[in-house]
Amino acid sequence: MLRLFSILLAVVFMCGLFSPVVAAERLRLATTTSTEASGLLAELLPPFEQANDCKVDVIAVGTGKALKLGESGDVDVVLVHARSLEDQFMAHGYGSDRRDVMYNDFVLLGPPHDPAEALGTNDLVEVMSKIANSKVSFISRGDESGTHVRELQLWQAAGLVPQGSWYLEAGRGMGEVIIMANERQGYTLSDRGTYLAFKDKVDLKMVFAGDQRLFNPYGVIMVNPARHPHVKQDLARKFLDFLTSEEGQGLINGFQMAGEQLFYTQ
């Protein structure tokens, strides 16, 4: 009897070992550090994954690097925030479908004692000039992200080329840059969402916000399957449809940090 029981156990084990396992389909998403650091993806992805029996593999980098991953076909979808770079991506045939998803804004952060006297200044160009003239540390993303692209545009608008020991290009994600700026008691440009996610961890305050030039729109793009045939075209389109659907837009609008809404839909 014991021998028969052992044989039955062995059969059950072998059947389990060799039974086919159907892996969930995987979607590769390159997106910005801001969407991950803010916690938005943790809110958005589970409903999509459950509805489509899939897993979304997230690569969180700056917008420039995310688009490079799309160009090389290493991802199926990109979710980014630098419209000029997105337009180039589409014009060169790397993307087959682009849609507006949401927006927030950029904010200038600085130490509470505000050595550059940026607070109370109503002109954004003047604020950038004050920061440069103060020679107080400014921490730049320095990573070709959407935030970095916008920062360079602001220096250009002020007629300035930031350089010198006070200007540090970190080459890091937004959260790390906020921490670095806090440690150095300097200034930086951040998207509002990441700042709200980190504000209880740092002393930095918003010293300037609200200018039209700080508007920060996000777009989602499906990598072109005509250029990269292995792209998960059907699943990628479902992801674009989800983000722009009533359900997806509702999740985005409803996402809050410390009682504040982080992103808004178009």
Image (tube, rainbow, N blue to C red):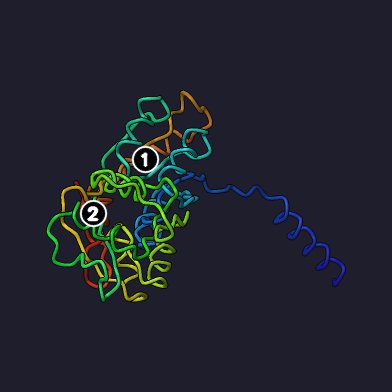
Q: Quadrant of residue 80?
A: top left
What distance separates the C-alpha of mark 2 from that of mark 1? Answer: 24 Å
Q: Which of 227 and 251 is in front in this view?
A: 227
Q: Which of 215 and 115 is in front in this view?
A: 115
Residue identifier under label 2: 104
Q: Residue 184 carries which label?
A: none
Q: What residue type is labelled 2?
A: Asn
Q: Earlier in the sequence, mark 2 or mark 1?
A: 2
User: How many labels, in total?
Assistant: 2
- Residue for point 33% across, 67% down: 197
Element class at badge 1: helix
Residue identifier under label 1: 238
In the rendering, at what x and y percent does residue 52 appear? 42, 47
Q: In which quarter of the image is residue 157?
A: top left
Say few, some or many: other residues with alpha carbon within 10 Å of mark 2 (under 14 / 14 to 19 / 20 or more): some
Q: Is residue 78 visible?
A: yes
Q: Which amino acid does label 1 sit on?
A: Lys
Left of 167 or right of it: where is 258? left
Position above or below: 132 against 22: below
In the rendering, at what x and y percent does residue 183 appear? 42, 73
Question: Marks 2 and 1: which is nearer the front?
Answer: 2
Left of 142 or right of it: where is 127? left
Task: Indicate the quadrant containing the N terminus: top left, top right, bottom left or bottom right.
Answer: bottom right
- Residue for point 46% across, 57% down: 170
Position above or below: 43 against 257: above
Q: Which of 220 and 194 is in front in this view?
A: 194
Q: Is residue 55 visible?
A: no
- Residue for point 31% across, 36% down: 84
Q: Nearer the viewer, residue 131 or 211?
A: 131
- Residue for point 51% across, 45% down: 26
Q: In which quarter of the image is residue 210?
A: bottom left
Element class at badge 2: strand
